[in-house]
Amino acid sequence: MSDAIDHPLPRPPEDRHRLTTSDGVGIDAVLLRGARPRATAVVVANGFTGTYRNPNTRAVAEALLPVGDVMTFDFRGHHGSGGLSTVGNEEIHDLEAVVARLRELGYTSVSVVGFSMGAAVAVRHAAIYGGTAAVVSVSGPSRWYYKGTRSMRLLHLGIGGRVGRLLLRGFRKVRVIDQDWDPRPAEPREVAGEISPTPLLVVHGDADSYFPVSHAIAIHDAAREPRDLWIIPGMGHAERAVTPELAVRVRDWLAERTGPAEG
């Protein structure tokens, strides 16, 4: 995987926010602000076990600041947020709580950049809730219960058993629900076509150890215009694999669809 993006200095101002989802879960979030008030915002949604405290997430968020103010947050069951992780199902309520808070703060254009589990949530949220200016899915799965790679087989072992869940709680500060989905939520590939006319960018690395590029192609093929697909040579999985160059490309793609980037 690629090295982390270096933090630019000085660090931008930030505000801590405590949100409550429609089903009553507390969400821990941080808003990074530019030098002056703006009407455009971007949400960064982490992958499973991720947190806004992670330096890779922070670096991506800071790279996107020329587009608009950036809110990062912890999904339910993760770190400072309440509740239990459902690994991509009820997390759409978490993302909607973040988007709703940004609208309350006066932002009229809100885009979402999601990674891995956060990418699946971003696609489903855009299809079900709508109202976002643009969606970027990075390293996202197209379907559930995928076990075609060693990394995903290990992940399923971790979330599917008591010992694995205890280890996740103890070492990663992630609390996972011990129940199966009932009913099963729609898969990203099943709802991607509902995102249009919101622009969708699907980004995936050809060295992803969790999901092969076929997942990205399936999401892109199921979507309708406007849509773009970037297969990145040598890129690994999710936040840790984002290089400064890729962050700038995503920033510029967002700027073209939501307004000019600030220099």
Image (cartoon, rainbow, N blue to C red):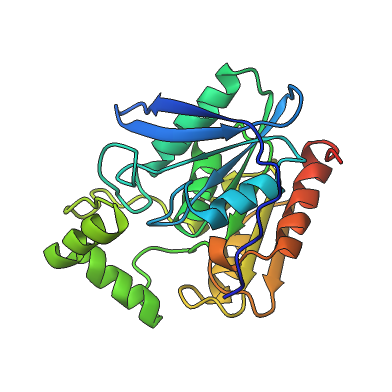
Please identify the quadrant where the C terminus is shown.
Answer: top right
Residue placed most toward the observer, 135 or 176? 176
Q: Residue at x 29, y 45 (%)?
A: 77
Residue 107 locus on image (x, y percent): 66, 23
Seen in the picture, residue 94 relative to 175 is either above or below; the reply is: above
Image-quadrant location for residue 6: bottom right
29 to the left or right of 79: right
Residue at (57, 75) in percent of width and height: 1
Where 224 sits versus 235, above or below?
above
Q: Position of residue 262 (x, y in %)?
A: 84, 38
Q: Position of residue 240 (x, y in %)?
A: 55, 65
Residue shown at 17% from the left, 60% from the top: 166
Left or right: 12 with respect to 154? Answer: right
Q: Residue at x 54, y 49 (%)?
A: 123
Q: Is residue 71 rendered to the left or right of residue 24?
A: right
Outermost left residue: 162
Furthest toward the front, the residue is: 10
x and y percentages locating residue 43 in the rendered image: 58, 40
Query: Is 234 placed left or right of 185 in the picture?
Result: right
Question: Image height check: is 28 above or below 228?
Answer: above
